[in-house]
Image (cartoon, rainbow, N blue to C red):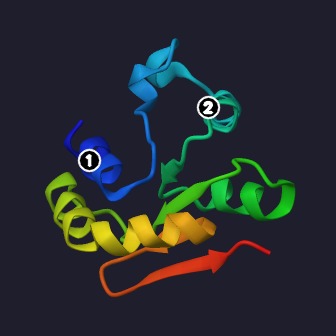
Amino acid sequence: MRLARALTSAGPDVVRTSDLPRGDANTDREVREAADQQDRVVVTEDRDVRDGHLLRGTPKRLLLVVTGGTSNATLLALFETSATAMGAASEVSDFVEVGPEALVHHPRP
């Protein structure tokens, strides 16, 4: 919950999968569809989701976390220190990658 709040304060509108109708039992497809219908950002470490975004355009909006297996406390600290940059990047890009040493966004065409 703290991670979702930190991201929402940065600008992107996010919701946890556990808050969706089927909770954590939702398939990746259901998560992508819900995010696209509600114009929300999918936040994931899953590079398969990135590939789907690049190849099929879904999810429409993506924040890829590239930190490797790190703790929630470390992720929270990263999101808090990068909040302004993530918010600005999400305004001009549908695909943002954030890691401990860099934030990269891919501007909309």
Residue 68 in the image, given as x and y percentages of width and height: 37, 69
Furthest-top residue in view?
Answer: 21
Dot 1 falls on a residue whose secondary structure is: helix
Please state which amino acid type lies under the numbered disc 2: Gln
Question: What residue is shown at x 69% (from left), y 30% (from top)?
Answer: 37
**Which part of the image, by quadrant, shows the C terminus?**
bottom right
Question: What residue is shown at x 20% (from left), y 58% (from top)?
Answer: 76
Furthest-right residue in view?
Answer: 56
Q: Which mark is residue 38?
A: 2
Question: What residue is shown at x 57% (from left), y 23% (from top)?
Answer: 26
Question: What residue is shown at x 24% (from left), y 36% (from top)?
Answer: 1
User: Would you name the residue on which mark 1 appears?
Assistant: 3
Residue 53 in the image, given as x and y percentages of width and height: 73, 57
Callout 1 environment at 10 Å: few (<14), some (14 to 19), or many (20+)? some
In the foreground, 87 or 60: 87
Q: Is residue 59 left or right of residue 41?
A: right
For marks 1 and 2, the one nearer the N-term is 1
Please state which amino acid type lies under the numbered disc 1: Leu
The CA span between labels 1 and 2 is 19 Å
Figure check: 29 above or below 88: above
Furthest-bottom residue in view?
Answer: 101
Dot 2 falls on a residue whose secondary structure is: helix
Contact, CB < 8 Å: mark 1 with mark 2? no
Figure check: 12 above or below 107: above
Residue 100 position by quadrant = bottom left
